[in-house]
Structure formats: structure tokens, C-alpha cells
Image (tube, rainbow, N blue to C red):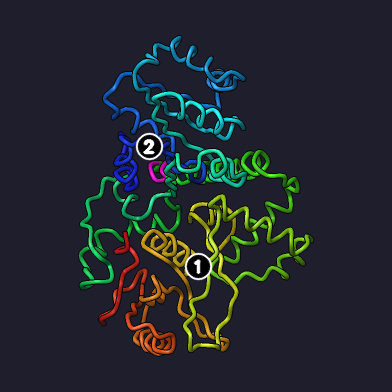
């Protein structure tokens, strides 16, 4: 069974426009599935799918005379006199593919749907050759709402920061939320039942990222140091980045460490969260915090405590909603997240009224009027409480 992602409806709206639809994101997030879904719903039969990971498909586009590509299309039963719909998967395997797409786009009536590794954009080929001709969509692992859809669990859409906490919903969904925190949201992982198989596939995802993606799409060659840095970052999830310390521990220059981390972020493995500031506050820290794209990968890479896993999962939940920052004073006081510069969110696995008082005080200092304690397990009996699983 194919489950529909939230982003699918957004992409589908552009099927009828001329521009190239580009779907990018980390490996195994479901790009190929959506590509095939889009093509299957095109009513015309004048369409084709190509996977550039296959040499035979790659050869179709790897020609000096681009007009000859149309001859290959005809050999596959495509009528070049009519509008053509082409889905091209894994475009990073052919370096000159953007030039090919640009030429065919400009000279023939072809609608392109393409996918590629996120790191492909580091080379800026799309920026240079397809300016004004593309619409880019980024894909990520499942959010918790999509996780429930894949589990075939019904839930009602609601604003988690409006309304009251439902103990009934908590009891109904808490098991699934714990699974989401522990194993993350890669679609294949969510659909697998056995834990050992989940872990095997997660290991394969990170191994492919290090051994294939990084090698193929960067000039980095220090595999051991790169993997060590990834593991170090995983063990420090939710903490402020100290480039000097990381440099010292791993034995690389600060510049190299920063370059690697920048690559990790541009390929969607990690995210750096900046500090929230206001004009009157000068007692803040400035370093960014680090979070991982998925809790399953995080768990494979490092042994984190329960609170860190909860924080990383919740970050990925709210990252889909809006701008995420954190707040911190130099005395060590912090608010975990500031959402869209107007909602303060403090995470506690088992929140108390004292936690709420601290959050109220810090929110006032930060100039944030709306605030919520976000919990994982216990169900407190006070207002301004949000259960993490309600954020979908």
C-alpha cells in the first residue's frame, strides 16, 4: 500500500505548469515513491520513468547531441510530437544532466519531474543552468502525523498550542509516540515491525551516507575522521556547538570541522539552531545548537539519554511548523525552543509547576508572551501544557 505524504498535495499542484519539478532530500526519505506517484496520476500515456542509477537509463541522456535523445525516446514508444512527461530519478549520477534538461526544456514540450541527492545542490548546477525553470521541494523523514498515517492510525488535525490537553488521545497514541522517539520517521523503518531489522536498515542508511553520498558529492576523503565527527555531534545533540573543542578531539583544523559540519547540514543530516535575541537583551550566548534529522539515525550513532532523544524528536516535529530558535542567558538559564519568535516551548519528560514558573520568568525576560511546557510521559494537571505527541 502507498501512503500519501503531506508534501504530495503541494507538489501535485504544479503538475500542470511548465517548470521542472525538483524533489530533493536525504536518501530513503521517499523521493522515488512520490516521483512514481506523480507519474502514475498523469492521465497521458506519453510518459516514461528513468533511473539514472541504472547504466542503461543513464546512457539515454549521456549523449553529445541532445537531439539524439529524442530518438531513444521514440524507441521506447514515446511520441515526440505530443507533450511528454518524464520522471528522472537520481539525477546526481549524471554530471551534465542539468544541461540536458535545460536544452530539452527549451526546445521540446516536455514536463520534467526529477529527484536528486540533497548534496547535489552543493555544486550549484541547478542555480546556474535552470534559473527560472525549476520549482524545488525538500523532503524529510516522516513527521509524527505522517508516522500515524503509515501506521493506519486515525487522528484529527488541530493546533497543538490551542485548546486543552486530551488524556484520551494521550492514552491512545502514547505507544506510537514512544516508537517515533526511539526509531524515527524514515518510511521503510516505520513499516518494519522487528527492531533488529529496523536497526539494520538504519545502519545501512548512515553507512551509505558516509561511503556513497559524501565520497561521490564532495572532495572529502578522511572517512574515519568524518564518521567520528558525525558520532561526536550525535552524542552532543541539543547542545551548543564548540568548534574548537571538536577540532581538538578529532584532530582536524577548526576550518575543516566547520566545512564538514556545513556539508552535513546542507545534506540534511543535521540542523543548526540559532539563538533567539531581542533588542533589549544583551546577556545571551551566541553559539548554535545541533540536532539530527531523525531519531533512528541518532540512536544508531550515539547513546543519548531519554531527554535528549525527546528533545531531538520534538525539534523535528516543530521544524515543519516554522522558524525554530532557542533562548539562553549567560547564567545558564535556557528555553529549549522559540517558535516563530512568539511561542516559548520548554521540554520536560515529567513537567512540574516549578518548571512552569521558570518558563514564565524566562519568557518574560525574552519578551515572549505565549509559552507552553511540553511533556512526554506524565500528565500534569495545569494549564499551558502540551503533550509532545499532539504536535503533528
Q: Toward which corner of the image does residue 317 lie, by quadrant? A: bottom left
Say which of 147 and 46 sits in front: 46
Find the magenta span and give its range. 187-191
Q: Nearer the viewer, residue 172 or 293?
A: 293
Residue drawn at the location 50% of the way across and 88% of the way down: 281
Nearer the N terminus, badge 2 or badge 1?
Answer: 2
Q: Which residue corresponds to the image point at 48% horizontal and 16% vertical from the top-left?
A: 70
Q: Is residue 348 in sight in this rendering?
A: no
Which element is circle 2 on?
helix
For label 2, the crowd category at 10 Å Cα-Cα, with few meaning under 14, some 14 to 19 and many 20 or more, is many
Q: Is 188 colored magenta in this rendering?
A: yes
Image location of residue 352, percent across then percent down: 36, 83
Report the predominant secondary structure element of the magenta stretch: helix
In this rendering, position of residue 106 left or right of residue 41: right
- Percent of width and height locating residue 148: 30, 51
Residue 283: x and y in percent read 55, 88
Q: Which residue is mark 2?
A: 34
Q: Is residue 387 magenta?
A: no
Mark 1 sits on what residue? 308
Q: Residue at x 45, y 52 (%)?
A: 183
Amino acid at each position: 500500500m502507498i501512503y500519501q505524504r503531506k508534501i504530495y498535495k503541494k507538489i501535485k499542484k504544479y503538475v500542470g505548469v511548465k517548470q521542472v519539478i525538483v524533489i530533493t532530500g536525504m536518501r530513503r526519505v521517499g523521493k522515488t515513491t512520490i516521483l512514481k506517484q506523480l507519474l502514475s496520476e498523469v492521465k497521458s500515456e506519453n510518459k516514461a520513468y528513468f533511473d539514472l542509477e541504472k547504466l542503461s537509463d543513464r546512457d539515454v541522456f549521456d549523449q553529445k547531441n541532445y537531439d539524439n535523445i529524442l530518438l531513444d525516446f521514440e524507441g521506447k514508444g514515446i511520441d515526440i510530437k505530443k507533450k511528454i512527461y518524464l520522471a528522472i530519478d537520481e539525477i546526481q549520477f549524471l554530471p551534465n544532466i542539468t544541461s540536458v534538461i535545460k536544452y530539452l526544456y527549451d526546445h521540446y514540450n516536455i514536463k520534467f519531474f526529477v529527484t536528486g541527492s540533497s548534496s547535489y545542490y552543493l555544486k550549484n548546477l541547478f542555480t546556474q543552468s535552470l534559473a527560472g525553470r525549476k520549482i524545488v521541494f525538500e523532503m524529510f523523514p516522516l513527521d509524527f502525523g505522517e508516522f500515524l498515517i503509515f501506521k493506519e492510525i486515525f487522528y484529527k488535525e488541530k493546533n497543538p498550542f490551542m485548546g486543552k490537553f486530551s488524556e484520551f488521545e494521550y492514552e491512545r497514541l502514547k505507544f506510537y509516540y514512544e516508537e517515533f522517539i526511539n526509531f524515527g520517521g524514515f518510511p521503510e523503518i516505520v513499516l518494519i515491525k522487528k527492531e533488529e531489522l529496523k536497526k539494520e536498515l538504519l545502519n545501512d542508511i548512515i553507512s551509505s551516507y558516509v561511503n556513497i553520498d559524501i565520497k561521490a558529492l564532495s572532495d572529502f576523503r578522511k572517512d574515519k575522521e568524518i564518521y567520528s565527527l558525525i558520532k561526536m555531534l550525535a552524542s552532543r545533540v541539543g547542545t551548543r556547538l564548540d568548534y574548537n573543542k571538536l577540532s581538538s578531539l578529532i584532530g582536524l583544523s577548526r576550518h575543516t570541522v566547520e566545512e564538514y559540519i556545513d556539508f552535513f547540514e546542507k545534506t540534511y543530516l543535521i540542523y543548526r539552531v540559532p539563538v533567539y535575541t531581542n533588542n533589549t537583551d544583551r546577556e545571551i550566548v551566541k553559539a548554535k545548537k545541533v540536532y539530527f534529522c531523525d531519531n533512528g539515525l541518532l540512536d544508531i550513532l550515539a547513546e543519548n539519554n531519554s531527554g535528549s532523544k525527546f528533545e531531538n524528536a520534538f525539534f523535528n516535529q516543530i521544524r515543519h511548523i516554522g522558524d525554530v530558535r532557542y533562548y539562553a542567558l549567560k547564567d545558564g538559564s535556557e528555553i529549549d525552543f522559540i517558535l516563530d519568535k512568539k511561542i516559548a516551548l520548554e521540554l520536560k519528560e515529567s513537567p512540574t509547576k516549578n518548571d512552569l514558573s521558570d518558563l514564565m520568568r524566562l519568557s518574560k525576560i525574552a519578551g515572549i508572551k505565549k509559552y507552553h511546557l511540553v511533556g512526554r510521559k506524565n500528565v500534569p494537571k495545569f494549564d499551558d501544557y502540551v503533550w509532545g505527541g499532539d504536535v503533528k
